[in-house]
Amino acid sequence: MPLNPSASNMAASHAVTPVPAGTVHWKKSPHGRHRAGHPPRVGGCDEVAEAGEGRMDSLHDRLLAHAGGLPNDDLLACLLSAWIGGRGVLPAHLGLSGSDYRQMLGRHFPGLTLNPPALEPVEVQRLDERRDLQQLLLSHRRGRDPSEVWLAAIVAAACMGPDHLWQDLGLRSRDQLTRLMRDNFPGLVALNAQDMKWKKFLYRQLCLAEDILICRSPSCEVCQDYAVCFGPEV
């Protein structure tokens, strides 16, 4: 049975930390993000979703038309088009600082003017948790391209969301996330030999580094919560 370590620094599950009153927290809806306490509009969900997918594809193509021919151009185009299209839970500047965000755009998509959505930054009370995740990713980076540093920050920010990591990143499938990890953080892919769900796997690595017992079961194979950690991500 999985245990949840203190949320002050890390958590073993991907449940959302309770948001204090007055804090803006973005949630997903069929129409993109909306503020907590404000329900999504009702009606026309399929049509809106299809229109949103079309806009995402158009923006993705526009981004690639400006791509600089660098590693992760296509992956960043996917993340940016999903983020601007309202998919996932990434905050302002994809979870990067404003200067890093502008540097990333200028390096990978030179000459492109892109107006980011007006979103709130990452919740302050979880910044330590996000930094721990970012450092974990960076400790296993491939070392091929500077964009790995930005992707580590983006993935760490997405880990603050309530769903599977690929969904919180706004990607279309878990396969896209596995490609992101394989191309940029191959050491973690090697460690995740049993194909544990990525968000749970990352938190498990943090807990192991701190010698925190997160499971009472002697092994994953006999754990009654096996499907929670290893089941299909749909």
Image: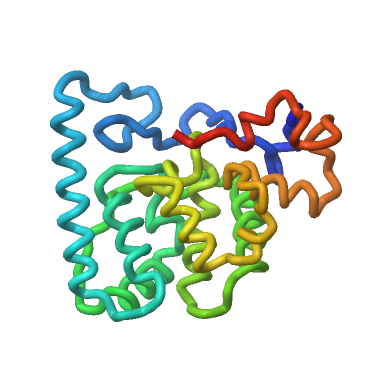
Residue at the image point whose x is 38% and y is 43% from the top: 88
Residue 191 picture location, percent across and down: 69, 57
Let me know if residue 120 appears in the view. Answer: no
Q: Image quadrant for the N terminus?
A: top right
Q: Quadrant of residue 69?
A: bottom left
Residue at the image point whose x is 45% and y is 61% from the top: 96
Q: Decide which of 34, 22 is in the foreground and name it.
A: 34
Please say if 167 is above or below 144.
above
- Tell whether 101 sits left or right of 67: right
Residue at the image point whose x is 68% and y is 30% from the top: 226
Residue 185 picture location, percent across and down: 58, 65
Residue 31 picture location, percent across and down: 24, 33
Total residue callouts: 0
Let me know if residue 232 appears in the view. Answer: yes
User: Which residue is at the far top?
Assistant: 42
Please say if 28 is above or below 40.
below
Please say if 191 is above or below 218.
below
Q: How is the image coloured?
A: rainbow
Residue 182 picture location, percent across and down: 53, 63
Q: Image quadrant for the C terminus?
A: top left
Residue at the image point whose x is 26% and y is 75% from the top: 67
Q: Decide which of 129, 61 is in the foreground and name it.
A: 61
